[in-house]
Image (cartoon, rainbow, N blue to C red):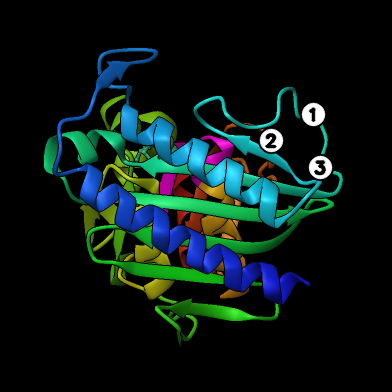
């Protein structure tokens, strides 16, 4: 049953991506949410409504935690099939760059990470996978990234954490071979999955983390809150996703 669902969700996310790429060529509405750099567009909302409607048909009885309000109201536990949906991740990039944004879906079953999907939209590159299944990029299985340390690789740290010197993260950036900021958790997660990045630190909401977490854990990467605890699926967390070595290196700096 999960295999059949998986195949259908792969088709769903590809369809949503093609809709997104053609909608991007036409004018769309942009509004602010909590502040001037927290944006939502009509495409985010259209995507979410389309995804949520189709998930309800494909997986009757499921519940959906999604960013823009079309999901199930008041989810406070992890029982059953829970889909976690980010209809466009990197909306600021979508608006300003028409590039470097993603669509993310994840299925958790009774709290267990089960399936994860990240679409790198403009490159039409779909990352998907789950525990015991492996992780695939456009159908090609990828191997786990090498267990490199901080000095040997690039890290992504979200800009507010550097600007506000949270948890000594500028020192983490200095200890790495370089710092990158992509402005999209989806893009940063795919960087970790392929080994282009050795670590990623950001304050992430449930839909920013859910899909990448499923695949990162399958590849043996560490996914933890910066204080070392296990990130809560339904809460926002300051999260580190990294190789095992980088996880240790970062801990020495952040304490
Ligand atoms: C945002 C992006 C950004 C991250 C923010 C997220 P959105 O997602 O992933 O990289 O730093 O925390 O909210 O709002 O574009 O879906
Ligand atoms: Ca997001
Ligand atoms: Ca979003």
Alpha carbon distance from label 1 to label 3: 7 Å
Q: Nearer the viewer, residue 31 or 133?
A: 31
For marks 3 and 2 on the same chain, the one whose residue lies earlier in the sequence? 3
Residue 29 lies, in percent from the top left, at: 24, 23
Mark 2 residue crowding within 10 angstroms, few (<14) / some (14–19) / many (20+): some
Placement of 109 over or under 236, stated as above or below: below
Is 156 one of the magenta-colored residues? Answer: no
Label 3 residue near ligand 2, CB within 8 Å: no
Marks 3,2: beta carbons within 8 A: yes
According to the picture, the residue beneath numbered tag 2 turns out to be 234
- Quarter of the image containing the N terminus? bottom right
Q: Is residue 242 visible?
A: no
Q: Which residues are magenta?
A: 199-208
Instruction: Kindly indicate whether the residue at mark 2 contacts the one at mark 1 (C-beta within 8 angstroms).
Output: yes
Question: Percent x, y for residue 48?
Answer: 48, 38
The residue at 42%/46% (across/down) is 201
- Of 91 and 201, the residue lying toward us: 91
- Mark 3 — residue? 78
How far is disc 3 from disc 2 in space, using C-alphas? 8 Å
Residue 98, position as x, y percentages in the image: 16, 45
Q: Return the disc, 1 or 2, that comes first in the chain's sequence.
A: 1
Which quadrant of the structure image shows residue 66?
top right
Asked which quadrant contains residue 175, the reply is: bottom left
Mark identifier at residue 76 = 1
Name the residue: 30% across, 72% down.
152
Q: On screen, 22 above or below 74?
A: below
């Amino acid at each position: 049953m999960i295999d059949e669902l998986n195949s259908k969700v792969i088709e769903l996310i590809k369809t949503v991506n093609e809709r997104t790429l053609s909608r991007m060529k036409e004018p769309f509405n942009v509004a602010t949410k909590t502040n001037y750099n927290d944006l939502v567009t009509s495409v985010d909302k259209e995507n979410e409504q389309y995804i949520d409607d189709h998930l309800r048909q494909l997986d009757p009885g499921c519940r959906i935690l999604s960013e823009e309000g079309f999901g199930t109201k008041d989810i406070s536990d992890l029982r059953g099939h829970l889909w976690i949906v980010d209809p466009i991740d990197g909306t600021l990039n979508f608006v300003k760059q028409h590039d470097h944004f993603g669509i993310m879906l994840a299925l958790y079953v009774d709290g267990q990470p089960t399936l994860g999907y990240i679409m790198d939209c403009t490159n039409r590159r779909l990352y998907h996978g789950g525990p015991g299944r492996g992780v695939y990029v456009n159908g090609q299985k990828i191997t786990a990234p090498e267990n490199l340390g901080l000095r040997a690789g690039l890290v992504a740290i979200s800009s507010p954490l550097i600007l506000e010197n949270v948890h000594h993260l500028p020192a983490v950036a200095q200890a790495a071979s370089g710092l990158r900021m992509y402005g999209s958790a989806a893009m940063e997660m795919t960087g970790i999955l392929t080994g282009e990045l050795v670590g990623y630190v950001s304050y992430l909401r449930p839909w920013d983390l859910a899909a990448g977490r499923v695949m990162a854990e399958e590849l043996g990467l560490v996914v933890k809150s910066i204080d070392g605890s296990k990130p809560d699926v339904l809460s926002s967390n300051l999260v580190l996703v990294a190789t095992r070595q980088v996880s240790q290196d970062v801990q020495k700096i952040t304490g």
